[in-house]
Image (cartoon, helix red, strand yellow):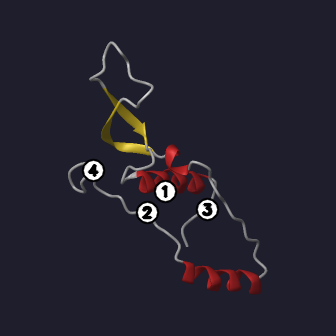
Amino acid sequence: SQKAGVDCDETFSPVVKPATIRPVLSIALSKSWLIHQLDVQNAFLHGNLHETVYMHQPMGFRDPSHPDYVCLLKKSLYGLKQAPRAWYQRFAEFVSTIGFHHS
């Protein structure tokens, strides 16, 4: 039910296109570069939110004395439109601190 410009602003996250992978691997092979692959389990759950996002109390975790209360999210969840961008921003900030930079 989120609407761009109302509930969230930037939602884009950079994605590698499959057509790019083959040339990059070919260059890496021809130059004998090391190649590393990373797969992060539950990646979207680690993105920090910079917007104010509320959600209803999840089923099974409702406070019976305050059933109308809502939760203020500090981290992204699957299904939020800004989740991919929040994860990418956190990842990019971390890898820059260990010496990586955008090519």
Check disc 2 and report the residue beneath it.
Answer: 13
| Observer-nearest of 1 and 22 | 1
Q: How many marks?
A: 4
Residue at left offset 57%, top offset 51%:
94
Cα distance, mark 1 to mark 4? 20 Å
Whichever of callouts 1 and 2 sits on the residue coming sooner in the sequence is: 2
Check disc 4 and report the residue beneath it.
Answer: 2
Check disc 1 and report the residue beneath it.
Answer: 88
Whichever of callouts 2 and 4 sits on the residue coming sooner in the sequence is: 4
Q: Is residue 13 above or below residue 28?
A: above
Cα distance, mark 2 to mark 4? 17 Å
Q: Amino acid at mark 3?
A: Phe
Check disc 3 and report the residue beneath it.
Answer: 100
Q: Residues within 10 Å of mark 1 (few under 14, many from 20)?
A: many
- Say which element carries label 3: loop
Cα distance, mark 2 to mark 3? 18 Å
Q: Nearer the viewer, mark 2 or mark 4?
A: 4
The answer to whether the residues at label 2 and label 3 have Cβ atoms under 8 Å apart is no
Q: Nearer the viewer, mark 3 or mark 1?
A: 1
Q: Amino acid at mark 4?
A: Gln
Image quarter (top left, top right, bottom left or bottom right) of the C terminus: bottom right
Q: Amino acid at mark 2?
A: Ser
Whichever of callouts 3 and 4 sits on the residue coming sooner in the sequence is: 4
Residue 76 % position (x, y): 43, 44
Q: Amino acid at mark 1?
A: Tyr
